[in-house]
Amino acid sequence: VAPGNPGMVGLERTSVAPEQIEADLYVIGPEAPLVDGIADRLRAKGGLVFGPGADGARIEGSKAWMKALLADAGVPTAAYGSFDDYQQAAAFLRSLPGPWVVKTDGLAAGKGVLVAHELDEALADLRAKLDGVSFGQAGRRVVIEEGLSGPELSIMAICDGQRAVALAGAQDFKRVGAGDTGPNTGGMGAYSPVPVAPPAVVDEVMERAVLPTLSELRRRGIDYRGVLYAGIMLTPDGPKIIEFNCRFGDPETQVILPRWESDVTELLAAAAAGRLDSVPAPVFGVGAAVTVVLAAPGYPEEPQTGARIQGLGAARSQPGVHVYAAGVALAPDGEGLVTAGGRVLSVTGLGCDLGEARHAAYAAAGRIDWPGLVMRPDIALAASGTGHPISSARLTPTPSSTSTEEEMRA
Ligand SMILES: Nc1ncnc2c1ncn2[C@@H]1O[C@H](COP(=O)(O)OP(=O)(O)O)[C@@H](O)[C@H]1O
Ligand SMILES: [Mg+2]
């Protein structure tokens, strides 16, 4: 892992630049290096790379570009306009009935979208974005959309340039506060499977959104090999695409990886080689996973960092639990870890249904502490109460927690 972070266990880390490393397969994690063209540089050296080049990564790097691509592909999505001029943008906003949606065109770590129920709030946000005050260059162009409503769903598709295969669906929680209140974040928790998205919905999303998008990319000469992450809203008029990301999204991936039972590396290598037809479709366990994000106080506006993390070992030793580390650093005195970012840890619990997985996640998360720790209490609450529990008799007898640890190491 280059560079990874000191909270990762069972993985070898290096500070050497990826371009200097010899590897059989490169899997690029985050969006910024993809947008910056790291996959192109590795491919130019002959590397087998899972992740789109800079041309394909624009699907996440520019929402205006993505919306135009979807329009050309005929993919259902919110009506929109894209602007760099305040007067034109304000006139378009005023013409919409609300709620009003104002998005930065460029990357904003999941914080660049305002969904406002007051026009004045949307206009003030628009001004701050276009002036470069709130998001710098990323906000100097905006996408304004009609407000949609309905449950959200994330479907990640593994693409090899012409074929695509869906992973298990997941749902994340974007708002910082319980009951979906407060500002948007990079994600405060997630769960999988999603009871409102049975296989027929996943198939519909693949046929009406993911495959047409992949075809349109090809038509434009873009050989897209990597994840097409579809952010979807299940509106009364059917599924609509909210956005595409160019990589494994978090926190959704933290509930999908532990459920992934077939060979992950084999699938990614086949996609990177343009040969998805040469491997079997991915298989997911019948159980459920729930992840709860532990954030620093002040997140997302002004996270306060540098606090010592207590109880990480105790949480990690719980059965059926994975703790993923994000914003962490080694403590200055060398004793354990301190918080070093907005979203610090993500605690995933596994179970035979969402209720059990939720219980495991919160029990382990409750062992972890630092001053002012923020976590939502209601991740997967509604879904675990109203969903369809899976009977434990259908659970695979294999010890899932150890096999997933091995998968993570692989
Ligand atoms: N047109 C829309 N109508 C209603 N809500 C929206 C709309 N677009 C985005 N949202 C909300 O804002 C969140 C973030 O928007 P998204 O386009 O996914 O940006 P990003 O993930 O880059 O911050 C979505 O998950 C959704 O909750
Ligand atoms: Mg999103």
Image: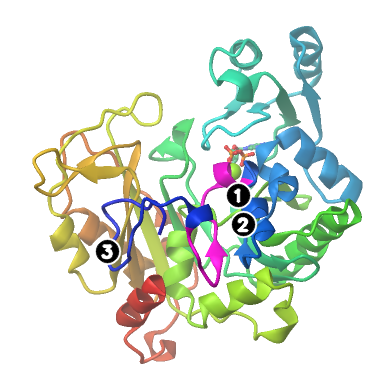
Which residue does the numbered mark 1 point to in the structure image?
A: 38
Residue located 49% across and 76% down the image: 260
The percent position of residue 257, horizontal first and vertical second, equals 46, 69
Residue 26 covered by magenta stretch:
yes
Magenta segment boundaries in residue numbering: 21-34
| Crowd around label 3: few <14 · some 14–19 · many ≥20 (10 Å) | some
Q: Given contact means CB atoms under 8 Å apart, are the residues at marks 2 and 1 in contact? A: yes
Q: Is mark 2 within 8 Å of ligand 1?
A: no
The percent position of residue 16, horizontal first and vertical second, equals 41, 52
Q: Amino acid at mark 1?
A: Ile
Q: Given contact means CB atoms under 8 Å apart, are the residues at marks 1 and 3 in contact? A: no
Q: Is residue 39 left or right of residue 376?
A: right
Which residue does the numbered mark 3 point to in the structure image?
A: 9
Q: Nearer the viewer, residue 297 or 389?
A: 297
Q: Amino acid at mark 3?
A: Val
Q: Nearer the viewer's eye, disc 2 or disc 3?
A: 2
In this picture, is 378 found above or below 297? below
Residue located 79% across and 50% down the image: 237
Cα distance between the residues tagged 2 and 3? 26 Å
From this viewpoint, which residue is outermost toward the top?
87
